[in-house]
Amino acid sequence: DTAVSQTPKYLVTQMGNDKSIKCEQNLGHDTMYWYKQDSKKFLKIMFSYNNKELIINETVPNRFSPKSPDKAHLNLHINSLELGDSAVYFCASSHDTGNTEAFFGQGTRLTVV
Amino acid sequence: QKEVEQNSGPLSVPEGAIASLNCTYSDRGSQSFFWYRQYSGKSPELIMSIYSNGDKEDGRFTAQLNKASQYVSLLIRDSQPSDSATYLCAVRGRGSTLGRLYFGRGTQLTVWP
């Protein structure tokens, strides 16, 4: 039973398109995250939600918009995709925002052509 | 961001040796620290968490924390080829950065038979 699952696993799309990535966790956690891992494997936080409320919004272009319909789901919508958006996007969750570890989904490899 | 720095490697050790991975962090008040392992093409997987100064052992893995020196390390004893992966150090933010889990750039470890 997958704890943090995201879909799709692979996404290939043309520049200028709009796409969404979905994430769900069945761990009962309050906090969810989106991370971007670039080609050099650096994991950078993009957004975090706690109980459906946005608590972290790093310096991310406005083309990226997260949405959390409930605390078990966190989706990421990307408008007007650019070549530089190509990366692996990871969803993660943690029990809360305190001193707790995060668990990651399997990642979505986005390729913009 | 340079909140978390790791020796970039790559690190190559023979099977059966001890692999030593190091990490320093900039926020002196950080309270929780994590080591993740990431195999190529896979998601980060938590292997150790540590919150107090000293050593914490789990099987072949030992995490060491020295808050005065702002230093965390991971020792892997009796290294196996299956330990070959990228190891990511992560540190929880606090205060204005509460909720953030900052990652280092990772150290690539190769264990050769």
Image: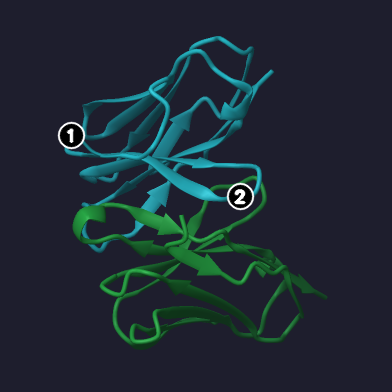
Q: Image point 36% across, 55% down: which residue?
A: B101
The answer for which chain carries disc 1 is: A
Question: Which residue is nearer to you in this view: A58 or B65?
Answer: A58
Residue B70 as seen in the image, left or right of residue B85: left
Residue B18 is marked as none
Q: Residue furthest right?
A: B113
Which quadrant of the structure image shows residue B22? bottom right
Residue at disc 1, secondary structure: strand
Q: Is residue B30 above or below residue A102?
A: below
In front: B89, or B28?
Answer: B28
Mark 2 residue crowding within 10 angstroms, few (<14) / some (14–19) / many (20+): some
Q: Residues within 10 Å of mark 1 (few under 14, many from 20)?
A: some
Task: Tell me which chain appears green.
Answer: B
For disc 2, the chain is: A
Q: Secondary structure at mark 2?
A: loop
- Above or below — where is B23 with respect to A12? below
- Same subunit, labels 1 and 2: the answer reads yes
Q: Which residue is mark 1?
A: A53
Q: CA distance from mark 1 to mark 2?
A: 28 Å
Residue occupying the point 39% across, 79% down: B70
Chain appearing in cyan on the rendered image: A
